[in-house]
Image (tube, helix red, strand yellow):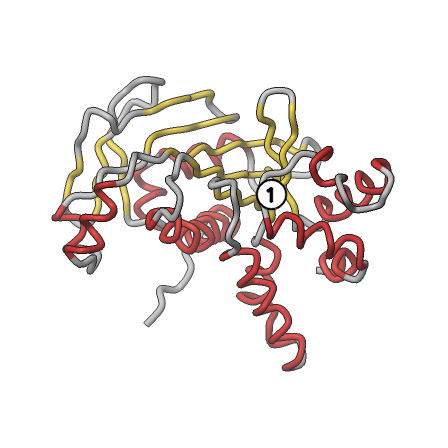
Amino acid sequence: MDEVFKALGDRNRRRLLDRLNGRNGQSLRELCAGLGMARQSVSKHLAVLEGANLVTTVRRGREKLHYLNAEPINAITERWISRYDQGRVHALADLKHVLESNAMDSDAFVYTTYIRTTPERLWQGLTDPEFTRRYWGVEFGTDWAAGSPMVWKEGGQETVHPEQVVLESDPYRRLAYTWHTFTPEWARANGIGDETLAGLTAERRSKVAFEIEDLEGSGTVRLTVVHDGFEDGSTVREMIQHGWPALVSGLKTLLETGDTLPQPQ
């Protein structure tokens, strides 16, 4: 975690995080505007933030967009928080809240982590029912070919809908699919009230993509989760931004140790 604290120790890098907190998903050109820094200096600061995994990037056409990434702060609070004094605990908690709950013009939720595994094993962790059942409690009924339907199986319930489909399938590199349909059965199983369910079903369907990058020679794979397609003020967006960090942490633990994270009591 030395890289995280080093990255946060520079005022200009904190300014860049503030800019992304105000509006996520900005290009280098947009981030440079109004900062009073040379483009090369901004690029260097962004490289440090990326190196600390506080910022992650996603290609959109010819542009590279920058997003806040909560993963390193989650790692600190979940695994090593007891090593720090109370003042630092509060600072980390505040930063975690900013990274996870920032109001932004861009609706995409982007989350990057590094897992000691192989692309093949990570793909299995995302698609094989024996894996997804253990850290997610969900199984997918599909052949994982682009355009194929998906059956979501959770808590003894099956959710089927013509728009629940695989969007992209490039084994060991990229997987994307539409998000599940919100049914009354799903709502009851998850303690969701009728009013919230009505709001969820009124929203357009979102989608999620998993980008897998093999860091050759390191025994590590970079996983980026991109969940987007939300409406302004989306309730689904609010729900998934807290769910994905826990799911990805569970997947990481399972692949690295063979065990799942303990469930909260």
Image quarter of the N terminus: bottom right
- Provide residue 50's location: percent of width, then percent of height: 70, 44
Image quarter of the C terminus: bottom left
**247, above or below 265, in the image:** above
- Provide residue 198's location: percent of width, then percent of height: 18, 48
Residue at x-position 66% and y-position 54%: 18
Q: Amino acid at mark 1?
A: Tyr
Q: Secondary structure at mark 1?
A: strand
Quarter holding residue 86: bottom right
Instruction: State whether residue 237 appears in this view.
Output: yes
Q: Is residue 32 left or right of residue 86?
A: right
**2, above or below 163, in the image:** below
Instruction: State whether residue 115 appears in this view.
Output: no
Residue at x-position 56% and y-position 56%: 99
Residue at x-position 66% and y-position 49%: 19
Q: Is residue 249 left or right of residue 231?
A: right
Quarter holding residue 132: top left
Local packing at callout 1 (Cα closer than 10 Å; few below 14, some 14-19, many 20+) is many
Residue at x-position 60% and y-position 48%: 68
Q: Which residue is mark 1?
A: 67
